[in-house]
Each structure stands twice: as structure tokens, then as C-alpha cells.
Amino acid sequence: QVQLVESGGGLVQAGGSLRLSCAASGRTFRTYTMGWFRQAPGKEREFLTYITNGGTSTYYADSVKGRFTISRDNVKNTVYLQMNSLKPVDTAVYYCAAGQSWFGSTNWQEYNYWGQGTQVTVSS
């Protein structure tokens, strides 16, 4: 029904920026809340941010608030994560996800579809 393909990960120095993209297939993309999560080795999956289907409501975890920005383009069926002022602690595999929660959710279990993940490595 919905397939998500991520891109944009890579290696960046501390203080640098990256923009992740998540391209969605499926004609119902515009009805989904989209979220970004990350998982570092040995750690639990961490919620980062979500954006509702209309793109007018967003929410951020404290760990990334003020540094990361989520956006979506419903014409291109793509969601983005702009990451600025990156720190080594941001090193993780980043995942985009789609869910049907009407007002968004910070709980990964409430998202139905997931991308394959893209590695972000921030060097000192």
C-alpha cells in the first residue's frame, strides 16, 4: 500500500548539515502522518519529529528541537528532514515512517509503514 525509500544519509563533520528525503509510493500518501525516528547501536528507537497530513502541524523531540526541521511535499509524495548543527550523538540509522494517527504520535508502534533506514554518521 505504502512503500518508503530514504536517501540523503552519509558522513558529515560536527556542526554540519544534511537533508534526508523519504519518497513514498502509493496514492494515499497525503492522508498519512509522517514521522522520523532514529536508532543508534545498543539503544532504543528514538522519536524525532512528525508532521500531519496537511503539513500545518509539527512536533519535535527536545533532543532535536531547534536543529531539525520536518517538511512534506504532497505533490512529490516526499517528506524531508533538514538536520543542522549536527553532533556526534546524532549518529544513528534514521527511519521515516507513515501512520494513520489523526493528530500524530510519538510512539513508533503507532506507525504502519517504514523505510529501510539511512545511516547518518557525524564525526568529531
Image (cartoon, grey):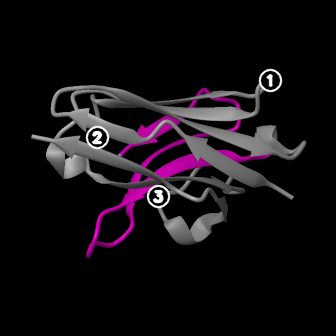
Disc 2 residue type (three-letter): Val
Above or below, 64 against 118 in this view is above
Q: Given contact means CB atoms under 8 Å apart, are the residues at marks 3 and 1 in contact? A: no
Badge 1 density bin: few <14, some 14–19, many ≥20, Cα 10 Å: few
Q: Earlier in the sequence, mark 3 or mark 2?
A: 2
Image-based side of 120 in relation to 25, left or right: left
Residue interval drawn in magenta: 31-60
- Does residue 62 appear anywhere in the picture? no
| Residue at the limit of the structure toward the front, as seen here | 11
Above or below, 44 against 29 in this view is below
Q: Quickly name the residue at label 2.
A: 64
Residue at 59 percent across and 59 percent down: it is 116
Residue 6 falls within the magenta-colored stretch: no
Residue 84 picture location, percent across and down: 29, 27
| Residue at the limit of the structure toward the right, as seen here | 27
Q: Quickly name the residue at label 3.
A: 106
